[in-house]
Amino acid sequence: SAVISQKPSRDICQRGTSLTIQCQVDSQVTMMFWYRQQPGQSLTLIATANQGSEATYESGFVIDKFPISRPNLTFSTLTVSNMSPEDSSIYLCSVANVTEQYFGPGTRLTVT
Amino acid sequence: DQQVKQNSPSLSVQEGRISILNCDYTNSMFDYFLWYKKYPAEGPTFLISISSIKDKNEDGRFTVFLNKSAKHLSLHIVPSQPGDSAVYFCAAHPGSNYQLIWGAGTKLIIKP
């Protein structure tokens, strides 16, 4: 298994501002993902964070809104840009091997 | 189109009795299925999985059953304990990459 930490664990932000969430894994992993869980909904994949290249975004998510960095195999950041109340959600970093997937504790974001 | 469905948003079970959580899927190409447990404000925790070549996998109090002809799987928890109160997500592995397809989750409430 992998141990994943995220910073910050929670934040309250004003609309129009940006927040960068950090994800640190205790071992080198190939696959890293960013998910969102909006209130009352299931997990939604935002993008796959690719090491050394641009992230691969899912339908409905764009790089200008959710820029992602992955400078190495143990670290990634997700930025939520120009936030609106609709961005209030839990953001989860995740890593995967062939048959299992592990999640960080999540970052609870509230946009006022 | 929801490829993985958990039709019961919530389930209430008496402590000590059996909890049965259900999940249906539409894509016969899914080769691996997983159950995750999620407490509020935490990331999902891997619980148990099953390969599509099996019809049952057991781990302590948790058993997952897979019925491929019906495209249905279920998670049995026996006996149910108060600490089992959480949201349970069913997820399917599409086989072609690491990205999981998630159900909407079922909130399990264990009553004392």
Image (cartoon, rainbow, N blue to C red):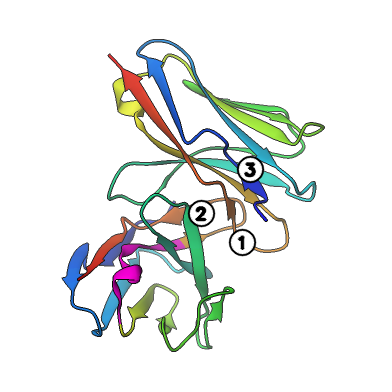
On whether disc 3 and disc 1 are found on a single subunit, the reply is yes
Mark 1: few, some, or many residues within 10 Å (few <14, many ≥20)? some
Mark seen at residue B98 = 1
Picture coordinates of residue A103 (x, y %)?
41, 56
In the structure shown, which secondary structural element does the residue marked by tag 2 occupy?
strand
Please identify, in this view, whether the residue under mark 3 or under mark 2 is nearer the observer: 3
Range covered by the magenta-colored residues: A83-94
Q: Quadrant of residue B22?
A: top right
Question: Is A111 positioned to the left or the right of B58 in the image?
Answer: left
Residue, x 23% and y 79% (percent of image)?
A15
Q: Which mark is residue B73?
A: none
Query: How would you rate the neighbour count of disc 2 (Cα within 10 Å): few for under 14, some for 14-19, many for 20 or more?
Result: many
Label 3, on which residue?
B33
Q: Which residue is label 2 attached to?
A: A101
Q: Which chain is mark 1 on? A: B
Amino acid type, callout 2: Gln
